[in-house]
Amino acid sequence: MPIHEQYEPGEPCWVDYGALDPAGARAFYGELFGWTFREEAGYSFVELGGQVVGGFGRVPAGLPASWNTYLAAQDVDAVAVRIKELGGGVVFGPMAAGEDGRVLFAADSSGAAVGFWEGHRPAGIVLAGEPGTWCAHELWSADAAFYRDLFGDRFGEPPGGGLAVRDRTGARPQWVTFFAVADRAASAATAVRLGATIAPGYPRATIVRDPWGALFALA
């Protein structure tokens, strides 16, 4: 099992889901990926085979359901200051997330939502790269200069964090999480049966909108 031991600044290190309908979303993703959920203090940890593969929480009032990518950071206070200098905005934080670390959630200069995680432990927190886990993240934006100013010129160079930057003309700037599956066609059919829709025009993966409108990809 490819458990990540550490993350360099700027690498995707965590993913979570903001749910409009937590019970319905757990049922959808539980059947699609074989996940179980362990709740702690109002936030659920997503598990597969006893390993944590992400998080699950309720989206704040007025916001849509979404999958959220978090990038590793050494100092989220400094990142928050720099985000504002670069034309982005802080949504919440920096704030403590239990005893494990500190979290910051922001919007980059194009409006794409993104989180930042300053962990207190060197060990990885995500099992990744096999069916039912995230295998890649993409930033759909024509310009990654904001992140290169935050993290340096190596930002966006795969395979370090399973990250790529794509110019998706016509799509709103956003981060997209890719989940590995054993059979993409079968998983897509299951998602549709459970109420999702498939977005056309992306041959390398299957782009899915879940029943609440949150976008993710099957690869």
Image (cartoon, grey):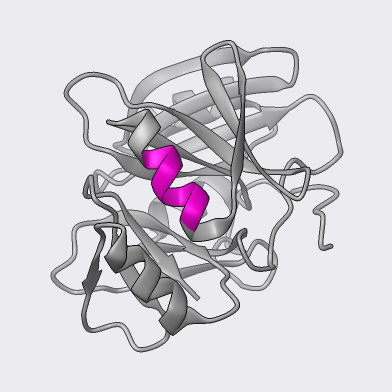
Q: Is residue 27 above or below residue 39?
A: below
- Look at 31% across and 54% down and name the residue there: 174
- Look at 64% across and 36% down and name the residue there: 73
Q: Main secondary structure of the magenta part?
A: helix
Q: Quadrant of residue 101?
A: top right
Tell whether position 92 is magenta: no
Q: Is residue 86 visible?
A: yes
| Magenta-colored span | 25-31
Left or right, 3 with respect to 109, comes to right
Left or right, 56 with respect to 160, comes to left
Nearer-the-camera pick, 99 or 139: 99
Q: Position of residue 130 (x, y in %)?
A: 69, 68
Q: Residue furthest bottom?
A: 203
Left or right, 197 with respect to 131, comes to left
- Look at 68% across and 66% down and name the residue there: 129
Q: Is residue 85 visible?
A: no
Tell whether position 27 is magenta: yes
- Look at 35% across and 75% down and name the residue there: 189
Q: Position of residue 163 (x, y in %)?
A: 55, 65
Q: Quadrant of residue 197?
A: bottom left
Q: Is residue 187 above or below residue 22?
A: below
Q: Is residue 93 above or below residue 107?
A: above
Q: Position of residue 131 (x, y in %)?
A: 64, 68
Q: How many marks?
A: 0
Q: Is residue 202 above or below residue 43?
A: below
